[in-house]
Amino acid sequence: MLPHCSLLLFLCVAQLLAASSALPFEQRGFWDFAMDSIDSGGLMAMMRDEEEGSAIEEILPPDVPMCPFGCHCRLRVVQCSDLGLTEVPKNIPQDTKFLDLQNNRITELKEHDFRGLPHLYGLSLRNNQISKVHPRTFIPLKQMQKLYFSKNLLTTIPKNLPASLVEMRIHENRIRNVAAGAFAGLSNMNCIEMGANPIHNSGFEPGAFKGLKLNYLRISEAKLTGVPKDLPESLRELHLDHNQIQAVELEDLSRYKNLYRLGLGFNHIRNIENGSLSYLPQLRELHLDNNRLTHVPRGLPDMKFLQVVYLHSNNIAHVGVDDFCPRGFGMKRTFYNGISLFSNPVNYWEVQPATFRCVSDRLAIQFGNYKK
């Protein structure tokens, strides 16, 4: 009986010692993350394979791309955001389509940072501290179409951008000058967002936008005092909100016959010269809110396709019966579906109902109360 008890006691102590000898998990390699899902039988099989010379290296060839440490790689998307990185990581898979490096502390882009990424389609560098870009940084990216570079410390447009680029967002930097030919060779570019840069009208050199066929351009929250000259004639949307523009002169809009949306809100505009809007026959939306206008701009009744006019928060004290609609029947191709006049010193009961005879619905008219 005694030998059996001694044997049982020995086995219990051995199990207790085995359990208490376990150490905290320490990652020694990439595949350690998968160990939790392997049962003891699978682990023994792996050990036997290693002893017999058929270890994991034969199952996974050495040329299998690894994901940069701390990043997430899935379906050709490499996400390395919010990691505190100070430089572009190495070992990015060659088949990567989208690389997310936003919200880090990268200060510089070097010549070979994106070498070996011929299939890259989109690159996000938003919210870093980048102030320097090597002239050859983007040379390898022959297929890149989207570049998100906002919230950095750039003072100029990076050189040698890929000819394939379609969309670039470079707002909230420190750009004060756009040199002639800054966008040379970018005939595929469709959209540029470059607001919130401390750039004045004089910061755009003649020929700065030469060769571009943009549909969309935003230069809001800058230091503009007038509509910039020589912007691309192809523009469909132009947003110049939150600047210091004081007037729209006769020739300011003469190049932009294709515009269908014009944003001039939150400026200091007191006057829009009579005839200046006649250059915009395709215009659908006109944003002139939060300015210093004292009357409805002239020429609105002649704009056949205009549907939305924002005039709220100005100093308009009178609205005439012909300020919005033409007198002749059928001259306007589309009815208004939005006219905002609230926060103006005009009393709505003094405006004749016929003033809005070309408005689709009375709910489309917004008057509200005026407060000094």
Image (cartoon, helix red, strand yellow):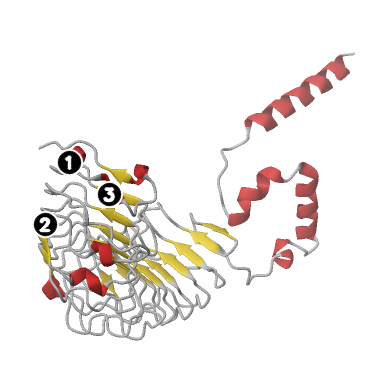
Picture layout, residue 203 above or below residue 50: below
Front position among marks 3 and 2? 3
Picture layout, residue 32 above or below residue 165: above
Residue 354: which disc?
Answer: 3
| Left or right, 170 with reference to 147 | left
- Considering depth in this image, is 26 or 127 the residue closer to the camera? 127
Secondary structure at numbered mark 2:
loop
| Left or right, 55 with reference to 250 | right
Picture layout, residue 322 above or below residue 351: below
Residue 350: which disc?
Answer: 1
Between the residue at mark 3 and the residue at mark 2, the CA separation in whole angstroms equals: 30 Å
Q: Amino acid at mark 2?
A: His
| Residue at 71 percent of width and 61 percent of height | 56
| Residue at 11 percent of width and 64 percent of height | 247
Front position among marks 2 and 1? 1
Between the residue at mark 3 and the residue at mark 1, the CA separation in whole angstroms equals: 12 Å
Measuring from the top left, give residue 285's x and y in whole percent.
Answer: 32, 60
Q: Amino acid at mark 3?
A: Ala
Q: Amino acid at mark 1?
A: Glu
Disc with the residue nearer the chain's start (2 vs 1)? 2
Between the residue at mark 2 and the residue at mark 1, the CA separation in whole angstroms equals: 27 Å
Measuring from the top left, give residue 29's x and y in whole percent.
Answer: 58, 55
- Considering depth in this image, is 127 or 358 the residue closer to the camera? 358
Q: Identify the residue under disc 2.
A: 268
Residue found at the far right of this picture? 1
| Left or right, 130 with reference to 146 | left
Residue 218 in view, yes or no: no
- Considering depth in this image, is 315 or 165 the residue closer to the camera? 315
Secondary structure at numbered mark 1:
helix
